[in-house]
Amino acid sequence: MVDPLQAAGYLGKIHQLVIVPDGVLNYVPFAALPTGRDRFLGDDFTVTYLPSAAALVGESAGTSSGRTLLAMAPSDAHLPNTMAEVRSIGQMFPLNSRVVVGKAATKTLFKRVAPDYDYLHLATHGSLNRNAPTLSALELEPDEENDGRLELHEIVDMRLRARLVTLSACETALGKGYFSETPAGDEFVGITRAFLSAGSQNVLASLWAVNDESTRLLMVRFYRHLLDTGGAEALARAQREVRRSNPRYRHPYYWAAFVMVGPTN
């Protein structure tokens, strides 16, 4: 796909690729496509995704005005590194962050305060309802008011002003059995489009069930770069660093799962 464009000279001054995938191509981590020995497309370009042109029609519900962060890691997700992950990220926003872990990371709290923040980071699982996609959900903590399932139809009804929503950890973009039981790409488009429709400018989500430890490293490096550059470039730099930091993480499984969706710069 890319070689003919490069051979024709169309990409000589291009540094960013915007992918609008269709169907099963929603599952392709384009940044991990090999271009040579131990080289990948993400080494030469920053890669972002758009679910469709229709995702760009609506305007954001508000205007971000700073670098405020809300990071949440519920204990029910049973992911050992997520609490350390959100605390490390919170330290990068020392004056403007709210880090909520364990039983305090409730759906009730998220729905109430999320519209006030520029960056939303949820380190948790997602679940796909194959029969009723709008009932697919992110898993937060239950309380007396809510069961903890933040369903897609509730996300769409929110009014966010976030520059970025990060859905960290396992299965936040895709559900189990997606190749055989769900039309290709539907659940990926659904969860990202829900946040885009709610007003978020961009969404960072995973294409498969990720490794807990490598995800923590990736996220910490991503936010360090995000303070200095755009989201797509920050992700590209973080992926390269994780890949080269430890021979164990050279395989794309460990660093290529996360994709940036939205008109980021």
Image (tube, rainbow, N blue to C red):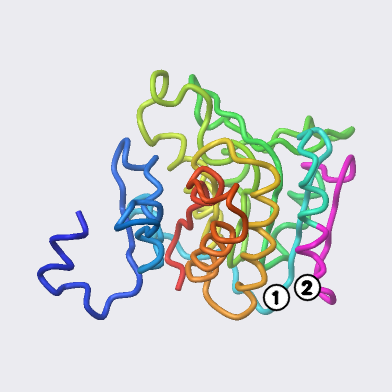
Tell me where residue 94 appears, x and y as whole percent: 84, 74
Tell me where residue 66 appears, x and y as whole percent: 69, 78
Query: Eyeballing the image, is 221 above or below 148?
Result: below
Residue at position x 62%, y 49% in the image: 167
**Which one is in front, 212 or 24?**
212
Amino acid type, callout 2:
Phe
Q: Which range of residues does the magenta coloring cover?
A: 87-107
Residue at position x 34%, y 74% in the image: 15
Mark 1 or 2 closer to N-term? Answer: 1
Tell me where residue 111 appears, x and y as whole percent: 73, 49
227 is within the stretch colored magenta:
no
Q: Which residue is mark 2?
A: 93
Residue at position x 40%, y 62% in the image: 42
**Which one is in front, 91 or 191?**
91
Tell me where residue 212 appears, x and y as whole percent: 69, 42
Q: 10 Å neighbourhood of mark 2: few (<14), some, or many (≥20)?
A: some
**Which one is in front, 60 or 230?**
230
Labels 1 and 2 touching (C-beta < 8 A): yes
Amino acid type, callout 1:
Arg
Q: Is residue 27 left or right of residue 140?
A: left
Which-is-in-front pick, marks 1 and 2?
2
How far is disc 1 from disc 2 in space, using C-alphas?
7 Å
| Mark 1: secondary structure | loop
Q: Quadrant of the N terminus?
A: bottom left
Q: Is residue 15 left or right of residue 239?
A: left
96 is within the stretch colored magenta:
yes
| Mark 2: secondary structure | loop
Query: Eyeballing the image, is 199 above or below 192?
Result: below
Residue 86 circle label: none
Find the residue positioned furthest to the left.
8
Q: Which residue is mark 1?
A: 67
Residue at position x 87%, y 42% in the image: 102
